[in-house]
Amino acid sequence: MPLILSEEARMVRETALDFFRERSPVTALRKLRDDSDPVGFSRDLWRQMAELGWTGFLVAEDDGGSAFGMTGLAQVMEAAGRTLAASPLLSTALIGASMLSLGGTAGQKAEYLPSLLAGEHIFALALEETARHAPARIELKAGRDGTGYRLNGQKTFVLDGHIADTLIVAAETDSGTTLFLIPAEATSRTRLTMVDSRNAALIRFDNVAVGSSAVLGRAGQGAAILEPVLDRARAGLAAEMLGSAQESFDRTVQYLKDRKQFGVAIGSFQALKHRAAQMFCEVEITRSAVLAAVSALDGNTNDAAALVALAKAKANETLFLCGNEGVQMHGGIGMTDEHEIGFFMKRARAAQAAFGDSRFCRDRYAHLMGY
Amino acid sequence: MSTFRAATRAWLEDNCPPAMRTRMPDSEQVAGGKRAEYVRPEQKQWLDRMAAKGWTAPTWPTQYGGGGLSNDEALILEEEMQDLGCRPPLRGMGLSMLGPVLLEYGTEEQRRTHIPPIVRGEIRWCQGYSEPEAGSDLASLRTRAVLQGEHFLVNGHKIWTSNAHHSDWIFCLVRTDPAAKKHEGISFLLIDMDDPGVRPRPIRLISGASVFCETFLENVRVPAGNLVGPLNKGWTIAKRLLEHERKGIGGIGSRAAAKFEAAIEDVAKHFAGETDGKIADPVLRDRIAAYSMDLHAFQLTRRRAAEEAESGAPPGPLSAMFKLQGTELNKRRYEMLLEAEGFQGLGWEGDGFTEDELRFTREWLRSKANTIEGGTSEVQLNIIAKRVLGLPD
């Protein structure tokens, strides 16, 4: 699998970099936060992203998408990461589209994909039940009720959960883990105000009754659909984090050149130079891991899952490093809300926790490698 | 390309002796030279067969005895050798450092004289760079060469001259203009070690081995024709040669020998036990995964750089990064191995330990040199900060 971008992927990359720089700089996230924006992203911006075709990268051509793949979507997500742009790229263009494409029935695809592609329908994956990513630990019950089901339980850290139109819920049934498509208004939702100013929700299911047509694919198929979708989510998020790490690093190196103390640029001090050089290496190494992961997912190769665990682990560590070193090297100004560098460090924390922290990824990698 | 691959594989299967498809102990590395000693006859046989095809130096031009292969063909040769477990037939500083520099900067006569014997393993080269007072600050070197008619007269003291006591020739950085700024008075000289004024003395290292020497140069007469490049312009050549050296050292993490290397997770399972197929000690398992993932990501980065180079993108200044990361990872590998082995990783010699256990101990100590030789890790960080990031001096 190649580790360099095709001409088409490079064009997507350039378009996306320009798009977010112009239309969703970090000031946009700050405004959403300061206004306590009820949606948490710009619906108008999301429709523009849909018009550029980004919602259809993981959807087959027969279903109205372009099937351009994870490598293409990763370019968009990396560009979004550079400006910390808030949008349903992960919840909807990646996870929602993948769930329907990989697991949905023909009827479900016909029902949901057109509005997803148009940027009119938001999805959210309701998976986590504990304070840590644990995809195998699902206790929310979907008990049989006539021909349908009744769902009882609670989900947390549901990204874009408070404004989603449809929740994709992982539940335990008598035939094993099963995914359900549930209209969000049937549940009780509490928005979680997060440190990174991005969307998440706590969602309660009290006797939520659905028909059997709400089952995504077939009952008991949940784990089989979830695993490849989660791998895509990890890789996509790793790409976004790579963009944030690169941006935090670039801004910090610029600051080292601009800021003067003791009559010289602080970037002339070896104590800072060496740490900047280490960051450079980590960003480059993370870029290789992310490219390898999305490329392997697109090629459906045997080592894809291990490469994804590798990419997410490196992205976790590298964004953590660049976020924290960014604040430290900016000194006092880095501690202020007025300066943007702190936004990157906050995002690092939240993104690390999503879909597997480094400890989780190492365990998964070791397991996949047979030890 | 597929025909080339098939033909290469067939040739290797026919010509690589079975004894040369086994793990190579350090004592059986072939570096050639007039005083080469072969533990097994197959070593010489394998060297001669590969040298006859020019495949000891696959990409060098055929007129100097090289293989004349394209980069793609050389990669296929390497892959097939790895796959069959073929040992490298010849290693050394002639192949990895001096040859490429002579091809770029040498005169036609220098190339015709020196390159074919390197390819055939007839002459072994060593490196006269560092001096007792010139380590990381290499350009402050003081070994003096004075041009007297047709000869240079050389006096000085070199150190860390790896394998000088087994070598035939030494390539040296010498000061030819003491009045000029330190980078501008250096020349690059080829010196025949048969001259009685050249005296190498081995230095015993922490690993117990003596691969490094110090080499004294006392009134050594060197023909003026052995000057490579212009007089006082040796620093450019010196730096280019260091790039080749770093490439070699940085490649430690992914050598062909990987086929025979013990997988670190298997070593851990052996010593720490196994539960349900997992290394029984969860902390050790986590640390080994962290190391293995860092190595994996590093190897992917080397591959990405190679693909970028092949696609015609201008080469990034990444050689310093590879040297830095490759050597730090190699040190980590041996620390992890010894940690996994526990008491069995502490053996120095004798029957209380297996051959592998003793080897790991010595290699652990040897690996400590990786982040010092060819420019320390700190020097590599300086290079990245300056040349890649553009941070001010």
Image (cartoon, helix red, strand yellow):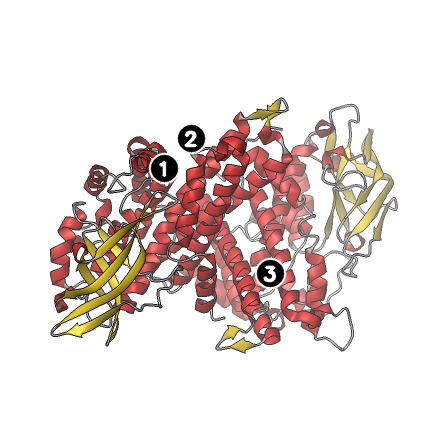
Please state which amino acid type lies under the numbered disc 3: Met
Please tell me whether mark 2 sits on a helix, a strand or a loop: loop
Which mark is nearer the camera, 2 or 3? 2
Question: A84 or B197: which is nearer to us?
Answer: A84
Which mark is nearer the camera, 2 or 1? 2
Q: Chain of mark 1?
A: A
In which quadrant of the rendered image does the N terminus of chain A lie? Answer: bottom left
Task: Using the rendered image, report if marks 2 and 3 lie on a common chain.
Answer: no
Please tell me whether mark 1 sits on a helix, a strand or a loop: loop
Find residue B50 and name its label.
Answer: 3
Name the residue carrying label 2: A338
Name the residue carrying label 1: A83
For image coordinates 72% across by 59% down, the residue present is B365
Position of residue B390 in the picture relative to residue A61 (left or right): right
> Picture coordinates of residue B212 (x, y %)?
77, 53
Q: CA distance from mark 1 to mark 3?
A: 55 Å
